[in-house]
Amino acid sequence: MTLNNENTRKLTGAIELLLESSSRINEAKPRRYWYPLSLATYGVEEIVEALDSLCSFRTTMWEKTLQFERQFAAYQGCSDSVMVNSGSSADLLLCFLLTNPYHPLLQTGDEILIPVVTWPTQIWSAMMAGLKVKFVDVDPKTLNIDIDDLEKKITPATKAIFLVHLMGNPCDMDRIMAIAKAHNLLIIEDCCEALGAEWDGVRVGNFGVAASYSFFFSHHMTTMEGGMIACSNPEVAEQLKILRAHGWVRNVDPTLYNLHNYDIDPRYAFVNWGFNVRPTDVQASFGLHQLQKLPHFNQRRVELANKFFAFIDTEPVLYRPQVSPKASPSWFALPILVATEAPFSRKEIVNYLELQGVETRPIVAGNIAKHPVANIFSAFLEDTYSGANIIHEQGFYIGLSPFHTDQDIDKLIKCLKSFLRRY
Ligand SMILES: Cc1ncc(COP(=O)(O)O)c(C=O)c1O
């Protein structure tokens, strides 16, 4: 921070006033939801830090991004991390890392297995990077990849698995790693909904080549928009930094690329193709403070989710994801499935909750093969995905924020009880 203590104190006072008056204005407005999907988790510290970047004219990727990347790698327990402008960009770079023309780990056209229930940019990233996506069904009991179907889908052309730990519930990494080893498959992980979750004491995101994270507003921590890639080694980080910024040897060691053999200005030297998916230091300013708060945020998420799930477990017509004894979830939201034998439909319970002021969403895209986009790509037609269909037809989620209270969860439970009493 370039601001001194006195200026920080003055700014803090001004921001507190602004936050107070904006919350008064918001409270006066009629609100559709008393239980919204997400609540703001940032405050004075993040705003002062961001203003410091703005006022020192260091808004683009600069020291704070580097500092945040180092601190994130230390939290995650990985070799390096590379910040980008969204979780979708992190997925994109992960896949382009695999088919990277400079140092390909896979060939264009190689098969990659992806669960059919996920946030769609995970799928688009693999397709755009030239990989052949083969969908694997999802187990409605865990919301994660159906490992029996995963084994069935492996062919000699299969070279990688792109996992997702949906809703923060870790996949069974013992079985998946054994399968990957037996078939010599690369693993990459989408942890955009699972920051802080662990399998057998190991943070998810540390099982493969690299892993993606999202810092969108409603996620475990926020940089407004933003994302991160956790890398298993420094070479991966180096390649990702080039892909992140134009294929340019900026922020990497230029001596590795024999630039002296070329009649070019080394300040504008390009060694690969690439995107521009760089973050800003304003986003990193948020990240530095949010990361400090993350352990507390995640603890509250787990406490609130456990309270809610303890109620769901008493209701025979509702169920929630099963958790392996080896898993420590880091809940992203409160997912619920309506049992097949329930005397009401998912639509009925969702409509009731919405009318009562509880915001809901489907379990991400449900079965993505049922969306209009499936008409464009033949990969969707190769199976019918019975597990994903259950999630599609019977599943929904309610939001979860560390700033929701125990009283909010009590009220939510009361609301669900009064719906269930009708049947
Ligand atoms: C599993 C998963 N992957 C990727 C993303 C994309 O992240 P972003 O919204 O930051 O682009 C999301 C977003 O919610 C997600 O849930």
Image (tube, rainbow, N blue to C red):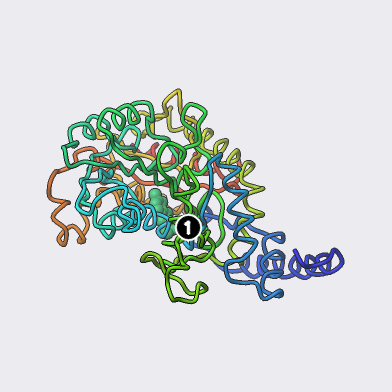
On the image, the x and y values in percent for residue 417 come to 45, 38
Amino acid on which the number 1 mark rests in the picture? Leu
Is 30 positioned to the left or the right of 64 in the image? Answer: left
Check disc 1: other Cα within 10 Å, few if <14, some if 14-19, many if 20+. Answer: few
Q: Quadrant of residue 420?
A: top left
On the image, the x and y values in percent for residue 299 come to 60, 38
Residue lying at 71% horizontally and 61% vertically, measured from the top left: 44
Residue 420 seen anywhere in this rendered image of the structure: yes
Determine the residue located farthest toward the front in the rendered image: 261
Q: Quadrant of ligand 1?
A: bottom left
On the image, the x and y values in percent for residue 135 come to 22, 45
Q: Give the position of the C terminus as an image quadrant.
A: top left
Q: Quadrant of residue 157?
A: top left
Find disc 1 in the rendering and name its residue: 256
Determine the residue located farthest toward the top in the rendered image: 325
Q: Secondary structure at mark 1?
A: helix
Closest to the observer, 234 or 189:
234
Residue 354 seen anywhere in this rendered image of the structure: no
Is 257 positioned to the left or the right of 8 in the image? Answer: left
Determine the residue located farthest toward the right in the rendered image: 6
Q: Is residue 291 above or below residue 417?
A: below
Count of marks, rendered view: 1
Residue lying at 41% horizontally and 26% vertically, measured from the top left: 324
Residue lying at 45% horizontally and 71% vertically, measured from the top left: 269
- Ligand 1 within 8 A of label 1's CB? no
Q: Quadrant of residue 387?
A: top left
Q: Is residue 238 above or below residue 246?
A: above
Q: Give the position of the N terminus as an image quadrant.
A: bottom right
